[in-house]
Amino acid sequence: MVRPGARGTRTDARGTRTDARETRTDAPAPATGARSAESAPSGADSAEQSGSDPAAGESSGSDPAIPLKTLAVLNWLGDRGVTGVEDRLNDVLDDDLTVTTEQVKIGYAEKETVAAQFRANERAGARVLLSKPLVGNVLVVFPMGGANKAAALMLQRAVEDLSSVSTEMGRDALTELCNMMANGFVDEWAALFDTTIDTGSPVPVQDPERTLVARILKQYGVGLFIRSRLRIPRHDVNAAIYVFPGKAEFLDKLSGVGLEVID
């Protein structure tokens, strides 16, 4: 198992990774009270064990209109990113995994609309900072029951008895898995944009989904998000990957992609 370190990774157009120093200085403090943002996932969310994760209250409301061409490209990018997740997991875990896209959503969110657009259900995972040239955040989260399964996926080759895994080890395994998934997701975008995308070290998170999103929106005023819900059928693992562009340059890059990229 590779434990998350103090250094981030750089993804380039060829999907290779080199060390890049983490420049983040504004990571939010862990949640206080009975539940810590850095607590290892535990227990099972009985309402989500079936694997379904239906959208709750995701009406478009007064969201800015997205041109149909751009919407089609963004949906394609959300699906393409899941392909990158599959490639990265198979490169590292060598497990011939299949990762399927369940749903891609493109939307706008503001602090005032978070409660209506995102769930109150608790999630565990990690967020990864994107820096120059495409500034933003990637948030990778699992339902609580799925988080335990995801951590087990990372540890199954290194630990014979998973029942002996400590809270800290489980949390570290989940964080590193999220880091791999986030980097795999943006690998595909880096290739398309023919640019490097620098990613910082993963920050473990555990809170209601709407709280995690609100925390990111405090940093940026863009509001656009791309969300891909995905599934790893062999291990009965469901996850969601959110990309939050942080600056107008990121949006310009997305808007500049033509329909010809779609197969």
Image (cartoon, rainbow, N blue to C red):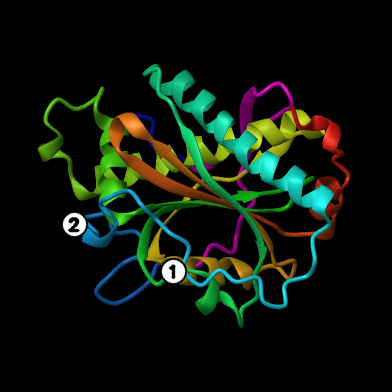
The quadrant of the image that shows the N terminus is top left
Q: What residue type is labelled 1?
A: Arg
Q: Is residue 253 within the magenta segment?
A: no
Depth check: give the residue in front, 186 or 75. Answer: 75
- Please provide percent x and percent y for residue 55: 48, 62
Answer whether residue 9 is visible to the viewer in this image: no
- Left or right, 157 with reference to 227: left
Depth check: give the residue in front, 54 or 250. Answer: 54
| Residue bearing mark 1 | 119
Depth check: give the residue in front, 242 or 9. Answer: 242
Residue found at x 43% / y 26%: 98
Q: Earlier in the sequence, mark 1 or mark 2?
A: 2
Q: What residue type is labelled 2?
A: Gly
| Residue bearing mark 2 | 43
Rendered position, 169 above or below 248: above
Residue found at x 84% / y 46%: 253
Using the rendered view, name the quadrant where residue 65 is placed: bottom right
Rendered position, 136 above or below 93: below
